[in-house]
Amino acid sequence: MSRALEGIRVVDLSHVLAAPITTMFLADLGADVIHVEPPHGDDAREFGPFAGEAGKNRSGYFISLNRNKKSMVLDLRKDAGKKILRQLIEVSDVLIENYRPTTMRKLGFSWEEIQKINPRIVYASISGFGQHSLPGYDSRPSYDMVAQGYSGLMSITGPEGGQPCRVGSSVGDIFSGHQAAIGILAALIYRQKSGKGQHYDGAMVDGLFAVLENAVVRHTISGEIPAPLGSRHPSITPFQSFKTKDSWIIAAIGNDVLWIRFCKVIDREDLTADPRFKTNPLRTKHVKELISIISEEISKKTTKEWSVLFEKADLPYSPVNSIKDICADPHIRYRNMLVDIDQPEVGKMSITGSPIHLSETPGEVYAPAPRLGQHTEEILRDLLNYSQIEIDQLKREGIISGEN
């Protein structure tokens, strides 16, 4: 079966997380992703947890993000390394990077310079605050937590009345990576029509601000300053997690029909006649009184007992799974969202699968993550037509390198 992006070549100058997420999805869909790494490698190769033999430990973090890719090592501080990168750009469809905007300009690979090399290329950049920004913002260093704080996301995350919390996953990187993948695919379709490439300018702060759903409009409409609410939804009630006899369960009661059904399940049908709780706006207005009542009822049974009752009543619910729970969940395996790979020097290990479930060309994990520079010689020889003599000379000069 051919893959959706077969024939699309991506020069991947990414590191750690934001852009590697993008190229992971493109590679899962069949794009030929060439991860160009500096001589010391992508920083993520040094991030735990590690697996494999002592002295040859491999980063599980790096492996999970770089499956299906090739690795090429180039020293872009040297002219010969830059020359090879230009040659790669000439024969590629996409270039992606997530350095500070000033870095690529200093290296001589700004959007303006790239257009001269290949006017059809789609050039994607991801940074903290964007390529086009207020003076000084383009040079600001940024990590996921910086974006979470700046965007306002942290101010609405955490327990009610508590201090702001970082979301438990690096969503600043991850959302911007997802959004870049959408932008790249849109630009490739536009290129089919126009023959022109274009520049995708992604910012982690933009990506998080764009997904703040009702928090922004709650403020712009009413002047409210949203604050952390724990697991509770700000405008739908009851819609949160509850402490059971032994753990936690989520009840997501999104309309009045579900509310009536829910009250019957918890044996509190009297609540449906209470004028304070007749409609969702009223339930939200009197949320503290209502949640106190519901919490007392939910605490009387175990999560498993409530799950059986909620399931029978066709209510939206879920146990609050631990990572151990969800990794053992049969549905996750059935959906191929936890897959086994045979990683060299590590052996069999399990990583997340592709969430892109297309009927004809689904995303899939079909190759392990590469060793540092594993494909350098192959790319030079087979794609750029370098002779072995030229390759050996580049090795001696320290322009290229790679693990055997």
Image (spheres, helix red, strand yellow):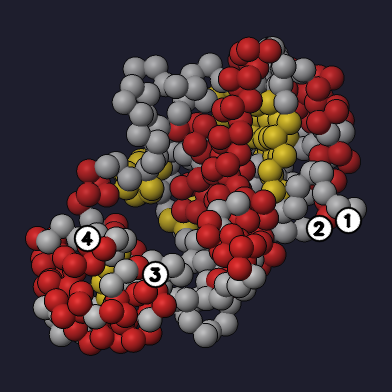
Camera-nearest residue between 310 and 21: 310
- Report how far apart the C-alphas of labels 3 and 2 lie in the structure: 43 Å
Estimate the spatial distance between the alpha carbons at disc 1 and disc 4, rounded to whole Å: 53 Å
Q: Which of marks 4 and 2 is in front?
A: 4
Is residue 38 in sight in this rendering? yes
What number of labels is visible?
Answer: 4
Sequence-wise, which precedes: disc 4 or disc 2?
2
Classify mark 1: helix, strand or loop: loop
Residue identifier under label 1: 136
Amino acid type at circle 3 is Pro
Percent coordinates x, y for residue 163 in the rendering:
57, 82
Tell me the SS state at disc 4: helix
Which residue is situated farthest in the front direction here?
A: 275
* Residue appearing at x 88%, y 41% in the figure: 106
Q: Mark 1–mark 2 contact, CB under 8 Å?
A: yes
Q: Is mark 3 on a helix, strand or loop?
A: helix
The residue indicated by pointer 4 is: 257
- Judge whether 101 appears above or below 312 on screen: above
Q: Which residue position holds label 2? A: 140
Q: Quadrant of residue 47?
A: bottom right
* Separation (CA) of disc 1 from disc 3: 44 Å
- Local crowd size for mark 3, using a 10 Å CA cut-off: few (<14), some (14–19), many (≥20): some
Q: Do the numbered discs 1 and 4 sit on residues whose CB atoms are within 8 Å?
A: no
Q: In which quarter of the image is the N terminus?
A: top left
